[in-house]
Image (cartoon, rainbow, N blue to C red):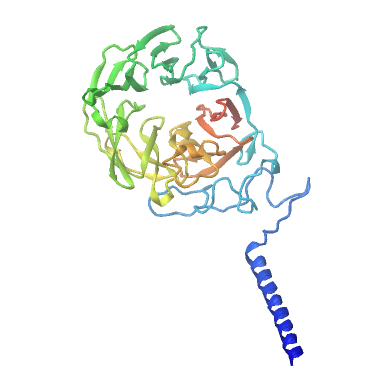
Amino acid sequence: MNNLSRFKKVVFIIVFLALISVIAYFLWITFLRPDEFTIPAPGQSTTTPPGTFPDIGIGTNEPGGEITGPGQLPGDFTPGISPDSPTGQIDPEAFAPDEVASGGFTQTQIIVKEKTVDPSLNANGSINYYNSADGYFYKIDSNGNITKLSDRVFHKVEAVTWAPNTDKAIIEYPDDTKISYDFNSEKQITLPSYWEEFSFSPNGEQIAAKSIGLDEDNRWLIVSGSDTSQAYALESIGDRAGYVYPSWSPNNQIVAYYTKGVDFDRQEIFFVGLNGENFKSTVVEGRGVEATWSKTGNNLLYSAYHSRDSYKPKLWIVSSSGDTIGSNRRSLELNTWASKCTFASETDLYCAVPEELPEGAGMFPEVADTTRDLLYKIDLKTGAKSLLAIPEGAYNISSLIVPENQQYLYFTDNVNGNIHQMRLE
């Protein structure tokens, strides 16, 4: 009897262990087994041509005034990540870089290997910039030749605000010294140290800025000649100074804008003119507004973050001239900041778009300081947007410059401040 009982126990244990093994295998094969994929051998063809993404189809019209059209990526496609990629990331070794931007990995050339500060496009298509390594200002012409703007050395420049289409700039130093300098006449004017956040008029003869006194009652939005002549207070900004942004529009209608919260997810933008004009305001879907004018000033590109977008910045464009202010507001369906975009023409917009953004990036932009950026082109006339290029190398782009002829694209990287060049034609 005892032998039979022991036998039953042994059988029960064996059956129990077998059952546990079956269940464990089922769980592993269902949830834990890694996806199988095949790495093509060198020279082996793939279903996707080198330098391009798999075919993702054509977008469809969506409600809410959002831009759609040929070349639009579906809303559930993460820019820069191949749907078939086992890691969800771009592998730069898997593609041979193209010489000309055509939607894939693209050759980039470092044309300035030193740290630069605030490069800007000039009227003749050259690029002006400050070289932190030697203290000189330079320009790069359309043929790639680099020459000095001046033989004068400017030590430890912290920031530069360039006048549109001219060789005139406001130069700021770490000790709060600020000068207005004309590189053609070599004329220098010292500005008050309490003037901040400068913006030139379209002709470069005037500036808008904030005059920040110690007392809130002595804080103003001011307008002045670029040589500090004929300065006057335009509007008191008091305790709202942090929400006022001097930004002179190319059509000369608006010199600044300020924002005011509407509710948790919305802000209202108010525009300030030179003569007390009662411009319309516009309500934007989101907070953390960052804006830049189109070439004519008839449109305003801005980015803002919203709870429905996991607080990531999203690009919008809205009419911003006269009676049209606030109309034709459209989402560009790209998660990036307006400061990472540039207009080559009124309808051709180029943007650097992070390959991936964590939740809350709109509130804390520093979390994206090392993320690889991809380059997109948006046709604002047709609504088409497309992946223009993936720069060769993992660059976080801090500024973009595209001359009107659109033969080349230039960008500075956020880590080294180098200037890079990419062929568009």
- Give how far across and how far down residue 287 sits, in percent: 36, 42
Instruction: Kindly identify the residue that appears in the image at 21 percent across and 27 percent down.
Output: 276
Query: In this rendering, would 282 be left or right of 112?
Result: left
Residue most toward the bottom?
Answer: 1
**32 relative to 17, above or below:** above
Where, quadrant-wise, is the N terminus in this rendering? bottom right
Query: In this rendering, would 18 be left or right of 83?
Result: right
Seen from the viewer's position, the closer of residues 16 and 404 is 16
Instruction: Kindly identify the residue that appears in the image at 39 percent across and 47 percent down.
Output: 306
- Give how far across and how far down residue 141 sits, in percent: 56, 18
Seen from the viewer's position, the closer of residues 385 and 14 is 14
Res 201 visible: no
Query: In this rendering, would 17 be left or right of 229?
Result: right
Where, quadrant-wise, is the C terminus in this rendering? top right
Instruction: Kindly identify the residue that appears in the image at 29 percent across and 11 percent down.
Output: 229
- Give how far across and how far down residue 154 sits, in percent: 48, 11
Across the whole image, how many numbered discs are drawn on residues? 0
Res 421 visible: yes
Seen from the viewer's position, the closer of residues 160 and 410 is 160
- Give how far across and how far down residue 312 sits, in percent: 44, 45
Query: In this rendering, would 340 be left or right of 388?
Result: left
